[in-house]
Image (cartoon, grey):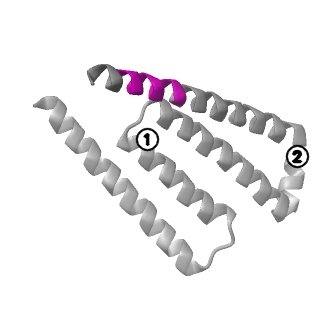
Amino acid sequence: MKKVEVLIQKACKIMELIVAVFVMLGIILALFALLKDGVVFRELLENIDTFQHYLDNIFLIVIGIEFLQMLFRPSSDNVIEVIIFLVARHMIVVDTTPYEDFVSVISIAVLCIVRQYLRKNEAKKEIE
């Protein structure tokens, strides 16, 4: 029975690495696509739709990088960071109402408080 558990754990690690490689390839391809667009800075300032599209792509890359970190170092801190980036991306890129913005800000604040609480608990455990 113990051998089966070890085998399953090894298989899970291998699958995690495969998924991480695919995520990394996706991030690299997204970076190249972003650079290939060659959007001129002046155009970003003049056209709000171009700017929002550019921001959307940047946030997707950042979220992909955070997700990749989460795959390699799974922790509550990394998971909360990914969620914070997702909420921030939604608030910045998508046209939202003031109410939705308020809920997003409250969500980020709550996530930051939870992250701080979890960090304190982890620090206490390390001391003990």
Q: Circle 1 sits on which residue?
A: 78
Report how many numbered discs are placed on residues in the image. 2
| 35 versus 108 height, above or below | above
Residue 104 in percent (x, y) is at 50, 68
**Main SS of residues in magenta:** helix
Q: Residue 13 in magenta?
A: yes
Looking at the figure, which quarter contains the C terminus?
top left
Give the residue drawn at x 51%, y 24%.
14
Residue 2 vs 112, above or below: the answer is: above
Q: Give me the C-alpha separation between circle 1 and circle 2.
A: 31 Å
> Which residue type does callout 1 highlight?
Asn
The type of residue carrying mark 2 is Val
Q: Position of residue 1 (x, y in %)?
A: 27, 25
Q: Magenta stretch: give its range.
A: 6-15
The answer to if 82 sits in the magenta stretch is no
- 26 to the left or right of 82: right
Asked which secondary structure carries label 1, the reply is helix
Mark 2: secondary structure: loop
Q: Nearer the viewer, residue 8 or 32?
A: 8
**Front disc: 1 or 2:** 1
Q: Which mark is residue 39?
A: 2
